[in-house]
């Protein structure tokens, strides 16, 4: 009997302990941080801006109030400190709940901080924290502070962090002048010997004051919006250059991250006459070292469709298709070349060529390693070969313009 | 020694769970960088030789615990002392693994809970299991083995399908030549986790079919070795060498990077489940070996009575062996190697075998004469 009583007591005690209330986090006591902005204050400390979700205001459907004139879906708090951990703890003086970082999918770094201090000093605090996930996306706020970017309210996707993430994801897939880079990827490329990193840029268009107001969302064309803008080039963790347009897309291309994009070629004297839409591509980089001189070859294979023709072209003739393919090849090659030249001008190996040499020629790379970025990379000989194929041409063969041309003869 | 029997397949399962146990948790052999998988493989092959030595000893005395045959081989006094050293080692190792468990829980999800509480909760379950004896341990092993493999296979499929694996991370293979890798294999992976399974010499006498012992041991080591190789390969291909080396629990970081179709993510808790199972068995087996060894050595009739006192010793030991996690890891990697692993795994068993061999031959010879 005594024994049974003892067991009963033991079981009850264990049941209480097993609920692990010791480290409990009640949902109603959590402030879910959706995005975090990091800036530098005037005296060189970190200033963090936290975008916290107001759960009641994001609930979808009718309850949310379709854009809601009552209160915004997120609330912003900020604090500063000598490091991110301190700033985050200090912020608790302003928030009624415990900050919860497990759902922080976006980290925004201000351009000034990225240029002056670099990212190296702030990454460890994020990487080490068990709650924070290093799959979250890293973005550099172009031309503004991170705080302004985080504060901006966005239409369609009510939570601004989601808007930024989705924009990057889709533009990377459909256009390819931007990349979505996670904290983990950025760390990996900063760490790798003689390599620069790329980080996506984001920009606030319009007045920062207006961007934080709900009124902004009540216009059909909001005065202030967020937009993916350029690719930041980091050398040893510091921002050195921004890439736009062709060099940007070429860079994404060589990094083999591009999925679909659009390439225009000239035809019959008309500029940008035919639009070629890529469907899939595969890029591989290989390296040789001859007499201590590294040599890189980039090979890419593209498949795609014809999307638009502004001049009458008879594509029922396979020879014409071959000609189109050749022009596409030339066009892509030009783009990749411009990306490489830009990287070489910056003396920053964002394309991971050094890594390829390291992987395939580890012994030779040891000699090149220390001076890779400044001496070897800028003078690097790069061979580009492009294979481009036109597979399909949409619903029509000849263009409607061909009909116009024939009938008006 | 209790009257119980386990089958060869149960032994196999226990051994696999034991060797996977805490080895899945840590960045195993990461000093070999991207060749960690090779170091693990080499360590596994090396351990086969030692397992043959352990098995030969067992085949001389198939019904005796090592604590007994050590006394037969070395004489009463020396044998008792040596057996006692082994028992102490088993207890120390059990407390180490228990500490690993507590540190993992505290680091990852229970930052405010004291280490003692986390360890004590697992220890209570283990004490209960020990009291039930080896048959219950083996049967629960069968049950949880399946669960663990379901988790592992599901995790593997998710990692592959989320497209995270980048085999380029494994290059260059053998950057510094084969020597550093062999060194890591000989100085780390050989002992942890492979020859650590010397504790199974205490379990072998319970096997119902002693002929299957050799095959079972080697197969179990082979399977767990291959599993560990796959785990390390995945860790390195997914999160890269540098991050793996910097991670306290690389597999956790790997599992945390799974993002399939935008909703299958944050699966860390499954990793924790697998770890708890593995560590539970590792501690249980080490603890069980210590219990029956002590009972045998000090002629205590029912070993299950020893579960409480020894359990409490292991629990407290797990708290006091190191003042912080780094110290704990340092002890395991650099100090335990020379003081415990090399003498207990590599030097003493062959000596015992040699002496036993001479004795057997003498006996044999005298019978014929």
Image: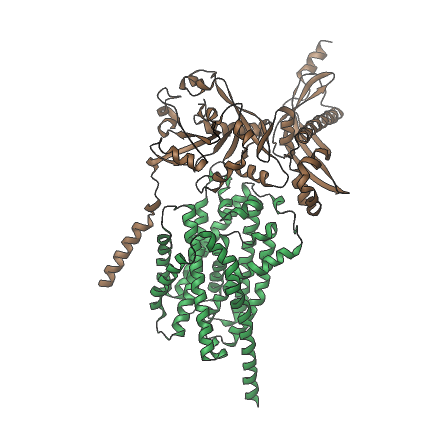
Chain colours: A brown, B green
Of residues B18 and A127, the one drawn nearer to the viewer in this rendering: A127
Could you tell me which quadrant the N terminus of chain B lies in?
bottom left
Of residues B139 and B131, the one drawn nearer to the viewer in this rendering: B131
Using residue A45 as the reference point, say whether residue A181 is left or right of it.
Answer: right
Horizontal and vertical percent position of residue B256:
48, 43
What's the residue at 39%, 61% (across, down)?
Answer: B314
User: Can residue B195 be seen at all in this image of the molecule?
Assistant: yes
Of residues B231 and B287, the one drawn nearer to the viewer in this rendering: B287
Could you tell me which quadrant the C terminus of chain B lies in?
bottom right
In the picture as drawn, the residue positioned furthest to the front comes out as A43
Horizontal and vertical percent position of residue A97:
34, 34
In the picture as drawn, the residue positioned furthest to the top comes out as A408
**Residue A313: quarter of image:** top right
Using residue B173 as the reference point, say whether residue A222 is left or right of it.
Answer: left
Using residue A68 as the reference point, say whether residue A372 is left or right of it.
Answer: right
In the picture as drawn, the residue positioned furthest to the right comes out as A291
Of residues B315 and A385, the one drawn nearer to the viewer in this rendering: B315
**Residue B181: quarter of image:** bottom right
Horizontal and vertical percent position of residue B191:
53, 61
**Residue B127: quarter of image:** bottom left
User: Can residue B65 be seen at all in this image of the molecule?
Assistant: no
Total marks drawn?
Answer: 0
In the picture as drawn, the residue positioned furthest to the bottom comes out as B369
Horizontal and vertical percent position of residue B10:
46, 63
What's the residue at 22%, 63% (across, down)?
Answer: A2
């Amino acid at each position: 009997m005594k024994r049974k009583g003892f067991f009963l007591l033991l079981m009850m005690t264990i049941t209480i302990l097993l609920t692990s209330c010791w480290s409990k986090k009640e949902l109603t006591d959590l402030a879910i941080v959706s995005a975090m902005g990091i800036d530098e204050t005037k005296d060189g400390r970190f200033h963090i801006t936290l975008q916290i979700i107001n759960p009641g205001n994001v609930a979808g459907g009718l309850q949310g109030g379709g854009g809601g004139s009552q209160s915004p879906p997120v609330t912003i708090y900020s604090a500063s400190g000598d490091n991110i951990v301190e700033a985050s703890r200090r912020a608790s003086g302003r928030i009624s709940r415990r900050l919860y970082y497990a759902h922080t999918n976006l980290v925004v770094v201000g351009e000034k901080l990225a240029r002056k201090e670099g990212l190296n000093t702030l990454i460890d605090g994020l990487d080490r924290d068990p709650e924070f996930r290093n799959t979250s996306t890293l973005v550099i706020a172009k031309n503004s502070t991170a705080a302004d970017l985080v504060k901006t309210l966005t239409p369609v996707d009510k939570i601004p962090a989601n808007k930024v993430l989705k924009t990057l994801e889709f533009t990377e897939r459909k256009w390819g002048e931007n990349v979505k880079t996670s904290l983990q990827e950025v760390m990996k490329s900063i760490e790798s010997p003689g390599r620069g990193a790329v980080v996506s840029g984001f920009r606030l268009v319009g007045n920062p004051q207006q961007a934080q107001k709900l009124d902004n969302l009540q216009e059909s064309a909001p005065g202030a919006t967020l937009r993916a803008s350029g690719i930041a080039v980091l050398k040893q963790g510091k921002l050195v250059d921004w890439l736009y347009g062709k060099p940007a897309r070429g860079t994404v291309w060589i990094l083999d991250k591009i999925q679909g994009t659009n390439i225009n070629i000239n035809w019959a004297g008309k500029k940008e006459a035919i639009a070629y839409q890529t469907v899939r591509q595969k890029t591989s980089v290989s390296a040789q070292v001859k007499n201590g001189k590294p040599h890189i070859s980039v090979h890419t294979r593209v498949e795609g469709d014809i999307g638009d023709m502004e001049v009458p072209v008879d594509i029922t003739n396979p020879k014409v298709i071959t000609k189109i393919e050749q022009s596409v090849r030339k066009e892509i090659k030009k783009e990749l070349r411009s990306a490489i030249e830009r990287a070489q001008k910056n003396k920053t190996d964002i394309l991971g060529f050094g890594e390829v040499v390291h992987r395939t020629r580890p012994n030779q790379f040891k000699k090149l390693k220390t001076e890779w970025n400044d001496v070897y990379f800028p003078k690097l000989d790069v061979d580009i070969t492009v294979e481009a194929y036109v597979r399909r041409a949409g619903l029509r063969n000849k263009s409607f313009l061909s009909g116009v041309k024939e009938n008006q003869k | 020694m209790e009257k119980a029997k386990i089958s060869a397949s149960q032994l196999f399962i226990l051994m696999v769970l034991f060797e996977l146990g805490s080895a899945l948790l840590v960045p195993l052999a990461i000093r070999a960088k991207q060749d960690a998988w090779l170091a693990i493989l080499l360590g596994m092959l090396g351990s086969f030789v030692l397992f043959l030595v352990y098995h030969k000893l067992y085949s001389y005395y198939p019904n005796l615990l090592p604590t007994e045959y050590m006394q037969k081989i070395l004489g009463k006094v020396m044998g008792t002392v040596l057996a006692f050293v082994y028992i102490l080692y088993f207890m120390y190792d059990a407390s180490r693994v228990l500490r690993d468990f507590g540190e993992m829980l505290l680091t990852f999800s229970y930052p405010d809970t004291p280490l003692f509480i986390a360890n004590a909760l697992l220890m209570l379950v283990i004490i209960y299991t020990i009291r039930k004896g080896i048959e219950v341990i083996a049967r629960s092993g069968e049950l949880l083995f399946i669960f663990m493999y379901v988790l592992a296979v599901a995790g593997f499929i998710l990692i592959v399908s989320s497209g995270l694996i980048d085999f380029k991370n494994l290059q260059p293979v053998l950057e510094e030549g084969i020597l550093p890798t062999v060194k890591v294999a000989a100085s780390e992976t050989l002992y942890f986790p492979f020859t650590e399974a010397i504790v199974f010499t205490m379990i072998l006498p319970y096997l119902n079919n002693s002929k299957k012992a050799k095959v079972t041991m080697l197969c179990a080591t082979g399977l767990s070795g291959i599993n560990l190789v796959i785990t390390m390969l995945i860790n390195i291909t997914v999160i890269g060498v540098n991050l793996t080396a910097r991670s306290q629990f690389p597999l956790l970081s790997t599992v945390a990077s799974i993002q399939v179709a935008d909703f299958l993510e944050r699966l860390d808790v499954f990793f924790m489940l697998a770890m708890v199972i593995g560590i539970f068995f590792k501690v249980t087996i080490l603890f069980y070996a210590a219990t029956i060894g002590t009972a045998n050595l000090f002629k205590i009739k029912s070993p299950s009575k020893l579960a409480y006192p020894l359990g409490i010793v292991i629990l407290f030991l797990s708290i006091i062996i190191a003042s912080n996690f780094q110290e704990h890891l340092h002890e395991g990697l650099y100090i335990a190697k020379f003081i415990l692993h090399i003498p207990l795994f590599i030097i003493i068993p062959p000596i015992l075998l040699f002496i036993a061999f001479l004795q057997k031959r003498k006996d044999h010879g005298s019978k014929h004469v």
